[in-house]
Image (cartoon, rainbow, N blue to C red):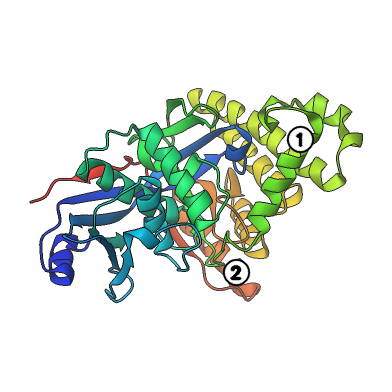
Amino acid sequence: MIDIKREFLEAFGYSPDVIAAAPGRVNLIGEHIDYSDGFVLPFAIKDRTYCAIGISDDRKVRISSMQRSNNILEFCLDEIKPGLPGDWQRYPLGVVWALGIETGIDIMIDGQVPLGAGLSSSAALECCVATALNQLFTLGYSLQDLARLTQQAENEYVGVPCGIMDQSVSLMARSGYALLLDCRDLTTRDIEFDLASSDLELLIIDTQAHHALTDGGYAERRTACESVVAKLGITSLRDLSFNQLESSRNLITDIEYVRARHAVTEILRVAAAVEVLESKDFIALGNLLNESHLSLRDDYAVSCPELNCAVESALSAGALGARMVGGGFGGSAIALIQVARKSETISAIEKAFANNGFTAPRFFTSLPSQGAAIIELA
């Protein structure tokens, strides 16, 4: 972390009242089912976004980012509402709006989660701001409350119809564990996620095919799922068994069928993944990752050539399993690999990308890390 306290002082002329941090995430399995009330199994990564906030003496919100040449953007509180034009600043402004802040504040952001890589840099930004505001104004919101409010900020203010997984894990994750999250009621269970003792590692492959979830593709798929729910008269796709889906196929369109098939089968894969993790059956886990990718690629159609290349070349190099992660249309993939074959796997992926004329990928790994927290002021 850059010295955000010093940068805040230099930008705004006084010291911040609170500093908070929140992590990005990798979803081990359970993709595109959080908005269908499914179960998901993400974990927080070590990369975090930090924010420093101070109370000002007017009714303005000033925002600066250490990744944006420290230009200060200024907004009157009364104008902060959905529809206000903007770019990255819509995420913290959406949180200010969702939490109902009525006092002027200055915000400095230091974002260390890779952008556009499918690692939920947006949720990390939202959750660190929400954590700081909750502390600063003694709002008393629970972690579940903050998850819903930050999701509301992204849905209604930013305009991305995301589910609640990203915000929940950024707020609730524990070091050393994946978070089994019930997206219907936000209850959680920590699932031990220890690869090192089996000489394994989860390789994260940033394809550098940067995605944008505001271009309609994400919304179209969510709309298809909601249409199935309406036509079949159920509460959500979580309440639909595979046999029921098959018997109802004539009631929905072909596109709706394959979208629903992904959701129904992915929910089953999450339950299976918990079982195999608890028994440390990593061969079975790898197979589930592979099945998840094929479903996302073929039924949900959210993969892309770079993601497919990353997955296929990792498997060819001996990975136990691999899949795309995140919203799709670009971003990152994960590969479950033997530590001893890490260099060989990376080389194979780099060669495949070069042969296809793709931008060179980036690689990193992360142990399951802690969720959002207040940083003590020195």
Q: Quadrant of residue 284?
A: top right
* Residue 28 in the figure: left or right of residue 299: left
Q: Residue furthest front?
A: 78
**Quick one: SS at disc 1?**
helix
**Quick one: SS at disc 2?**
helix
Disc 1/disc 2 C-alpha distance (Å): 42 Å
Q: Residues within 10 Å of mark 2 (few under 14, many from 20)?
A: many
Q: Nearer the viewer, residue 328 or 95?
A: 95
**Residue found at x 22% / y 55%:** 53
Q: Is residue 61 above or below residue 318?
A: below
Q: Which residue is mark 1?
A: 230
Residue 168 in the image: state x and y as whole percent.
43, 38
Q: Earlier in the sequence, mark 1 or mark 2?
A: 1
Image label count: 2
Q: Nearer the viewer, residue 308 or 14?
A: 14
**Residue found at x 52% / y 64%:** 347
